[in-house]
Image (spheres, rainbow, N blue to C red):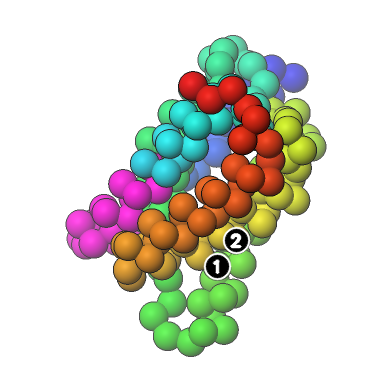
Amino acid sequence: MMLELLCFRIVVVCIFMIAAWRLGDWKNWQRYYPTILFVMAVNLSAGYLSYHHSLWNYSKDFVVTTGTIVEFVNTYINLPSAVLIYLSLFPAHGVLRQRVYLVLWVVIFGTLEFIDHYVFNGIFYTNSWSWAHSVIFDIAMFYIIRVHFISPWKGWVLSFIVAAFIISQFGFLTAEMK
């Protein structure tokens, strides 16, 4: 099963990279760069804050020996690729089209995590977190990404609110923090 998990992880990374290369608006990458950095900073901060109180952990394979490796791949490859594609193709008009587009991304991320958890046992949940929580988190994440793109300070405020909610609801106040 370790080989299958490794192959799944490699395929996911390759899909994100190829999709970003083919679908991303590289001519205007500077427009998306602040939001890409925002997502990277938030992900790294979450990893740091939850170092001793993870909500999800990763199974080992032949390459992944710690969760840090997965978090670095997510932070430096998967998330920047996803943000570039997400913002590049975001519908300019039509609230319904924009909501459907956001839901599409939630379905993509939710499906990948579902496969990772339920098929490959590559991700597992701790401290009362679940796949359903991840899907709700994905809704907030993609909404906040768009908000940050339009108004960075509002994106930061929303991120702090979501972080405070997660910290208060999932036992971080009593958790040992690094």
Q: How many labels does the image show?
A: 2
Residue at 75%, 51% in the rendered image: 132
Between residue 11 and residue 35, name the one nearer to us.
35
Q: Where is residue 91 in the image (x, y as percent from the top left)?
A: 43, 77
Whether residue 15 is visible here, answered yes or no, is yes
Q: Which residue lies furthest to the front in this view?
A: 174
Q: What residue type is labelled 1?
A: Leu
The residue wearing badge 1 is 102
Q: Could you say where residue 63 lies in the image, as x and y percent from the top left?
A: 54, 15
Q: Give the range drawn in magenta.
A: 23-40
Mark 1 and mark 2 residues within 8 Å of each other at the beta carbon: yes
Judge left or right: residue 82 versus residue 167: left
26 is higher (above) or lower (below) than 115? below
Q: In this view, does 149 lie above or below 73?
A: below
Q: Quadrant where the N terminus lies?
A: top right
Where does residue 137 sit, x and y in percent of width and height?
A: 61, 53
CA separation in Å, label 1 and label 2: 7 Å
Q: Which residue is labeled 2 in the image?
A: 139
Residue 100, image quadrant: bottom right
Which element is circle 1 on?
Answer: helix
Between 13 and 95, which is closer to the camera in this rendering? Answer: 95
User: Would residue 141 appear left or right of 90 to someone viewing this image?
Assistant: right
- Judge whether residue 25 is colored magenta: yes
**For discs 1 and 2, the disc positioned in front in the rendered view:** 2
